[in-house]
Amino acid sequence: MKTNLTISFFFILTVSFSQNERKVISYIDSINSLASNHYKSNDITQSFNYLLKNVELSASIDDDYGNAQANFLLGNLYRYMGMPDEAAECYSKMLKSAKEVEDNYLIASSYLSLGEIYKLIKPMEAVIPYYKKALTYASKNNVRDENNIDKRQSILFDIHMKLSHIYMSVYQPNEAYMNLLAAEKNLDNNWFSKASLSYAYGLYYVNLKSFNLATRKFSDALAYVDKSKNDVEDLRKSILLKEIYKEQSVALASLGKVDDAYLALLNHDNYREKLIKAEKLKEEQNANSKFFMLQYKNIAQTANKELWLVQNKSNEIKSVVVYISVAAFILLILIFILVKNYRSKRRLSFILQERNRLLQIAKNEAEKSSKLKTDFISNVTHELRTPLYGVVGLTSLMLEKNSLNEEDQKLLKSLKYSGDYLLNLVNDILQMGKMESEKVELKNVSVNLREMVGSIIGSFEYRLQESNNEIHVLIDDSVPEVIMCDNVRLSQVLINLIGNSIKFTNNGKIWLRVILNNLRTDDADIRFEIEDNGSGIPKNMHKTIFENFTQLDENKNANYQGTGLGLSIVKKIVELFNSKIELSSDLGKGSVFSFNVTFQIDKNVLQDTKPSKKGKIVSLNQGYKILIAEDNKINQIVTKNLLKKENFICDVVENGLECVKAFKSNTYDLILMDINMPVMDGNQATQEIRKENSDIPIIALTAADIEEVKRNFGTIGYNGIITKPFDNCEFFQVINAHIQASIAKSKRVSTMVKVS
C-alpha cells in the first residue's frame, strides 16, 4: 500500500512538473513571437527586452530549442543594428543549442547566418566553409521550422545563391555556375527568388564577358520584379533593383548601347538615393535603441562581474579557512623537519667548505697547467718553424735543378717529405686549437682548380712511389676553369684525404674525382670524391673516426704515422664551407670520402687573364716590386727565389732600419716585414713607414703563433700576416690579394681626382 502511494506521488509530481515545463516552453514561444513582431515593426528596444528575457528563461529550464530561436532573433537584431561581433556571438550560441536538439533547420540557419556575418569581416575564402556546412545540414531530410513547415527547398535556394555570389567574387566561375544550377533546382514560385536568380545569372555572364546574355538576364530579373504587387516597396526590392540597374548599365555600356546604359544608370541612382534616405531614417530610429542596447550590455556585464566577485570572495573565504588549517598542520611538520635539516646542513657545510677549498686549488693548478701547455706549444712551434722554413724551402729549390742525379733527387725528396711531414704535424696541432676556438675564417681568391689539383697530386709523388700506389685524377670537363675559394683550406682537405688513402693503401689504386653537380650563371656546385681500394673502415668507426686523436685499431696501425687529427680537421674545414663530409666504407673493401661545395665563378679572371701554368692561383704576372726585410740569410734566399719564380722583382734588407731607408729611396708595391730583427724590429719599422705612407701593403712575417700577433698587428700598421714556414700557395694568395686591393684603391682615388 505504501509502495503504491509512493509511486502515485512521484507520478503526479512528474506529470505536474512536465505540465509546468510545457507551460514555460509555450510561454517562451509566445515571447519569441512577440519579439519577432516588435522587430518587424521597428520597435527594437521592446524586441530586445523580450529576447533577453527569453534567452535567460530558456537557459534556466534547458530549453535548447527556445534558446536557439531566441538567439537567432537576437542575432538578427544585432545584425540589423550594425553590431557584427554581438550578432556572431548570438549565432554561435544558437548553433550550440541547435546541435543539442539536432534540429537540421536551425543548424543550417546558424551556419548560414554566421557566413553572412563573417562575410563582412573576413576574407571570402574563409567564409565558404560556413556555407558548405549549412548546405550539409540543409540537404538532410528533416528540415522544418517551429511550425513544422518544410524549409528544405527555400534554405537550399538561399545557400546556393550565397555561394554563387561568393565564388563569383573570388573568380571561380565554374563553382559559381554549379551553385546557380543547384539554386534553380530549388527555385520556388516567388517573384523575388526568380528575380534574384536571373540577376545572379546576369552577374555570371558579366564575369564571362558575355554581355548580350547578361543584358537578357537582367531584363528577365526586372520583368519578375514588375510582376510583383505595385504596393510592394520593401527594402529588399529597392536593393535588388539598385543592383540590377547598376550591372545592366555596365553590360549595356560594354555593348556600346550608351543611351540605354545611361537610362539604366539613372534608375540605379534613383534607387540608390531612396536607399540612402531609408538608411538615414533607419539610423535615426535605431540610435536610441542602439544606445539602450549598449547601456544594457554594460549594466549586465557590470552586474555579472559583481556577482562573480561576490561568489569568488565567498569561495575565497571558505578556501582560506581550509588552507589555514592545513597550513598550520604542515607548518608544525616543517618546523620539525627544518630543525633536523639545519643540524645536518651545518655538518655538511663544514665538509663542503673544505672540499670547495680543495677544488679551487685544483682549478688553479689546472689553469696554470693549461697556460704552461699553451706557452710550451707556442714556443716549441716557433722554434721549429724557423729552421723548417729553411729546410723545406731550400729542398724545394734544389729539387728544381736539372743537374741532380737520380740518387740525389731521391735523397732530397725523402728530406722534403720528412720536412713537410713535420711541418704538417706542427700546423695540425695549431690548426686544431684555432678551430676549437672558432678563429678560422675562409678567404675568397681566384683559384685555377685544375692547376691546384695537379699541384696537390705532384706533392704526393714520393709517397706514391714508396707505397707503390697509383692515383687517378678525373675532373669533369664542365667544371669552371677559375673559381673563388679559400684554396689553402680546400687544399688542406684534399691533402689530408689523399694522404689518408695513401697511408692505408699499399700496391693499390686511389681516385680523385671532381664532378660538376650543377652550373648556374654566377656559381657552381662541385662534388669532390676520394676513393681507394685499401683496408677500409669498419661501420662502427664511421662517426668516431672524425673525432680528435682517433685512429683505427691502435695495435694494428702501429706502423702507420699520424696523430689522429687529419680527419677531424677535414670535417671542421668542410663545415666551414657549409658542407658535410660523407663516408662510405666497409672493412677490406676500401673507402670513399666525399663532400659538396658551392663556389662562385670568377668571370673577370676567365675573361681578362690567362691562368698561369706554374701556380695554384691566378698570378698577377706583371713584375711587381717587393721589399723583403729579413735578418736570416737562409730565409732571405728562400723567400727571394720563391718570388723570382713568380716574376716578382725583389730587394732584400737585413733589419728594420735598412727597410725604412730602402722604402724612402725606392718605390715598392708591397713590403714583406719580418717582426724579429736586430737594430730596429719589424713593428718599429712599420710604424715609421706608416708616418709617410698609409697605402702601401705591409705583410708581417712571423714564426710565432699568428693569433698572438693578431692582437696588435692592426694598430701597428700591418695589412696582413703570414706564418713561417708558409704554404707557397697561401703565401702568393696573400701577396696577390693585397697588391690587387692596393691597385683597385689607387684607381678609385685617381677617378675621384679626375671627377673633381
Image (tube, rainbow, N blue to C red):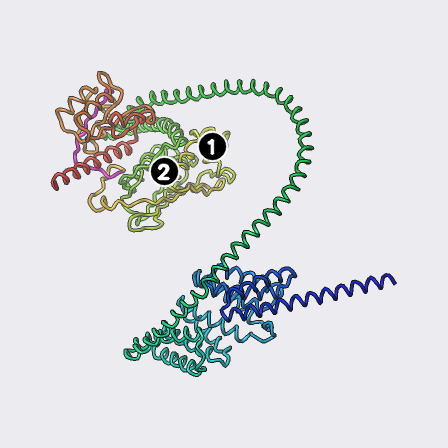
Q: Secondary structure at mark 2?
A: helix
Q: Quadrant of the C terminus?
A: top left
Is residue 288 a member of the stretch shown in magenta?
Answer: no
Q: Amino acid at mark 2?
A: Leu
Q: Can the viewer see residue 595 in this picture?
A: yes
Q: Quadrant of the N terminus?
A: bottom right
- Which one is in front, 301 or 697? 301
Numbered circle sitting on residue 459: none
749 with respect to 414 (left or right): left
Who is closer to the viewer here, 358 or 96? 96
Q: Which residue is mark 1?
A: 551
Which residue lies at the image location 51% right of the left edge and 64% below the top edge? Answer: 45
SS type, badge 1: loop
Q: What secondary structure is the stretch in magenta mostly built from?
A: loop
Residue lying furthest right in this view? 1
Q: Which residue is mark 2?
A: 494
Image position, residue 406 (x, y; %): 29, 29
Query: Is 622 one of the magenta-colored residues?
Result: yes
Alpha carbon of mark 2 to alpha carbon of mark 1: how far?
19 Å
Provide residue 143's location: percent of width, then percent of height: 58, 72
> Horizontally, is 362 left or right of 198 in the view?
right
Residue stretch in magenta: 617-633
> What x and y, as percent, mark residue 310?
61, 47
- Disc 1 residue type (three-letter): Gln
Q: Is residue 411 visible?
A: no
Q: Position of residue 98 (x, y in %)?
A: 59, 65
